[in-house]
């Protein structure tokens, strides 16, 4: 459906790494405006590295990366401001003195640039972002007093307050209970539909996103597959990446078969 | 006691204390939030080594203090950025090295130099009008830069990586913060001394940290506590003839412990524990 649109993120035989480590090798991938892309792959497969690359925090060691028609070694701060990013869950210092609204307002800072103070308009944008995630009632609550799922919503609101073109979400449901996981995924789906945002969603929960994304990208240092979920989620493709114990049940659920059953 | 305030030296030292107290408590907010407490301590000792070298060689001590202080924070920041070493390790090494240098420089001096020790323990009551002007000028500079970049400084204190990712030039702001810490330390050196300046940076902000969950209120409380304890410390020092540095710091520490006892954050936790 979105194939006719122009790509806003384009990897062209790009490799990324750290000293002594190649985290992503020879990636060629285009992401179009308005697309909902799911990224899956085992631990250490380079998913977070893909985010950091898209944000221009790492330059390719080989190949090229274009974002919004801009070669990424020229990626400047104002490009980053157009990408809303939810980092892989770190530890939130529960004592850090910041309220929910103050946290979301930080999403405005990059877009505003230096020397500009946030004003009433930015406050209104932040409040709107909070109402999108249904956290506006909690605007004056200390961030540390919220549950993990509520904090995740606040961080999504901060990303939305950037008024981004792309939303980059690194394992947004990890560490949440089942209801909260479901709610966050529904929220993301809703944001995609409502705001027509391009969404890149990294997750380990294949079953939860398979029916919602336009496209799945399967990574393990290299790009193993990229396409509609039905084409990517095939036993022969998945087993290359996850090993042989992975099975697809008759209800289309992907599970890892218990190793001990063989004995 | 009232007539004390009519003396020129007293007016000078009250003004110096208020400025240093205010400056340290504002910079302290970012130091505490960004987890740079140890950097403040390390910088103070590096700056003191600069002062000692200045007196040894007959060079201007404050200029060398600034050079030593800046070199320390920049090396620390660079090492952290490269991810080669944890911040506390690199600053620990620099801290001990500069302290050893300071002792070496003092040892090389032919005569006992009381002025050098003034920088170690602070002597706010003997602050001169020239020094007051330097303190005033640097305070205005540091506070001006903080006001100018406050939103970026808050953001990197909360989450530097996130700030970088959302389009804030976070690394440059981090180095700005390190520079401001070094300048603040040097400004305060003569007044409170190398040993106690660290307390002046740390305690008001940590006290405020106990009392509020909002960034804005935190800064406000920190300034009020910093200025009040510094001024009150000077008054106590002059009235009862006790050294000014310890008077300020012990007063601030007392306020800190009272705030820990009555911290709303702590109370809330206690209530939650009872409820379970
Ligand atoms: N800061 C770093 N320094 C050195 N190597 C790193 C760094 N960050 C990641 N790597 C390496 O890069 C590779 C990819 O890491 P990455 O974090 O992108 O994986 P991931 O797919 O996000 O894993 P996970 O599912 O555990 O989050 C790994 O081999 C990892 O060891
Ligand atoms: Mg990751």
Image: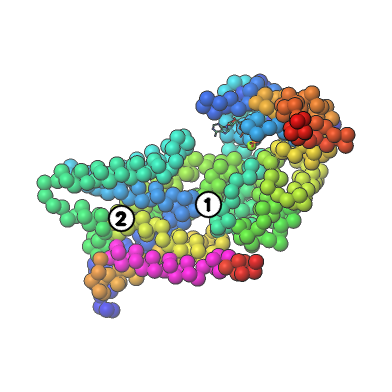
The part of the image, by quadrant, that contains residue B253 is bottom left
Return the residue at label 1: B154
- Which portion, as a residue range, is magenta? B244-269
Circle 1 residues within 10 Å: few <14, some 14–19, many ≥20 = many
Q: Give the Cα distance between marks 1 and 2.
A: 27 Å
Residue A28: image location, x then y, percent:
69, 23
State the predominant SS element of the stretch in magenta. Answer: helix
Which of the two discs, 1 and 2, labels the residue nearer the N terminus? 1
Does label 2 point to a residue whose CB lies under 8 Å from ligand 1?
no
What's the mark number on residue B195? Answer: 2
| Side of A130 where A57 appears, left or right | left
Nearer to me, B182 or B37: B37
Quarter of the rendered image showing ligand 1 = top right
Q: Could you say which is closer to the camera, residue B52 or residue A92?
A: A92
Residue at the image point whose x is 85% and y is 34% from the top: A249
The kind of secondary structure element at disc 2 is helix
């Amino acid at each position: 459906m979105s194939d006719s649109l122009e790509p806003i993120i384009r990897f062209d035989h790009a490799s990324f790494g750290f000293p002594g480590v190649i985290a992503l090798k020879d990636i060629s991938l285009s992401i179009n405006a308005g697309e909902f892309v799911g990224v899956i792959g085992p631990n250490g497969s380079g998913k977070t590295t893909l985010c950091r690359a898209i944000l221009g925090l790492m330059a390719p060691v080989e190949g090229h990366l274009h974002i919004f028609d801009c070669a990424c070694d020229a990626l400047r701060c104002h490009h980053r401001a157009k990408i809303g990013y939810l980092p892989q869950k770190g530890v939130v210092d529960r004592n850090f003195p910041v309220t929910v609204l103050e946290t979301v307002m930080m999403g405005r800072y990059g877009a505003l640039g230096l020397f500009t103070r946030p004003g009433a308009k930015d406050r209104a944008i932040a409040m709107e972002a909070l109402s999108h995630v249904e956290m506006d009632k909690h605007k004056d609550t200390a961030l540390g007093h919220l549950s993990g799922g509520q904090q995740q919503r606040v961080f999504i609101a901060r990303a939305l307050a950037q008024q981004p073109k792309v939303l980059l979400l690194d394992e947004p449901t990890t560490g949440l209970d089942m209801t909260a996981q479901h709610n966050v995924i529904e929220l993301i789906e809703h944001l995609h539909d409502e705001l027509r945002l391009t969404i890149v969603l990294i997750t380990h929960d294949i079953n939860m996103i398979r029916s919602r994304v336009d496209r799945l990208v399967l990574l393990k240092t290299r790009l193993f597959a990229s396409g509609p979920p039905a084409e990517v989620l095939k036993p022969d493709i998945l087993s290359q990446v996850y090993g042989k114990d992975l099975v697809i049940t008759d209800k289309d659920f992907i599970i890892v078969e218990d190793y001990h059953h063989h004995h | 006691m009232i007539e004390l305030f009519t003396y020129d030296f007293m007016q000078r030292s009250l003004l110096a204390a208020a400025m240093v107290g205010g400056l340290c408590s504002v910079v302290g907010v970012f130091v505490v939030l960004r987890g740079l407490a140890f950097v403040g301590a390390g910088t103070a000792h590096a700056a003191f080594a600069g002062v000692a070298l200045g007196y040894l060689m007959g060079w201007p001590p404050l200029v060398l203090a600034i050079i030593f202080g800046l070199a320390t924070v920049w090396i620390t920041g660079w090492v952290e950025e490269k991810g080669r070493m944890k911040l506390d390790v690199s600053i620990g090494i620099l801290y001990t090295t500069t302290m050893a240098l300071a002792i070496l420089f003092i040892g090389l001096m032919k005569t006992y130099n009381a002025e050098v020790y003034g920088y170690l323990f602070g002597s706010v009551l003997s602050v001169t009008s020239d020094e007051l002007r330097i303190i005033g000028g640097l305070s205005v500079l540091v506070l001006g830069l903080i006001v100018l970049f406050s939103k970026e400084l808050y953001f990197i204190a909360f989450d530097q990586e996130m700030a970088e990712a959302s389009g804030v030039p976070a690394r440059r702001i981090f180095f700005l913060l390190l520079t401001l810490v070094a300048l603040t330390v040097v400004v305060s050196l003569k007044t409170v001394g190398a040993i106690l300046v660290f307390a002046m940076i740390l305690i008001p902000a940590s006290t405020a940290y106990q009392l509020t969950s909002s960034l804005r209120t935190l800064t406000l409380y920190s300034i009020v506590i910093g200025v009040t304890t510094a001024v009150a410390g000077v008054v106590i020092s002059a009235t009862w003839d006790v050294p000014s540095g310890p008077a300020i710091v012990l007063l601030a520490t007392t306020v800190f412990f009272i705030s820990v006892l009555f911290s709303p954050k702590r109370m809330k936790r206690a209530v939650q524990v009872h409820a379970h």
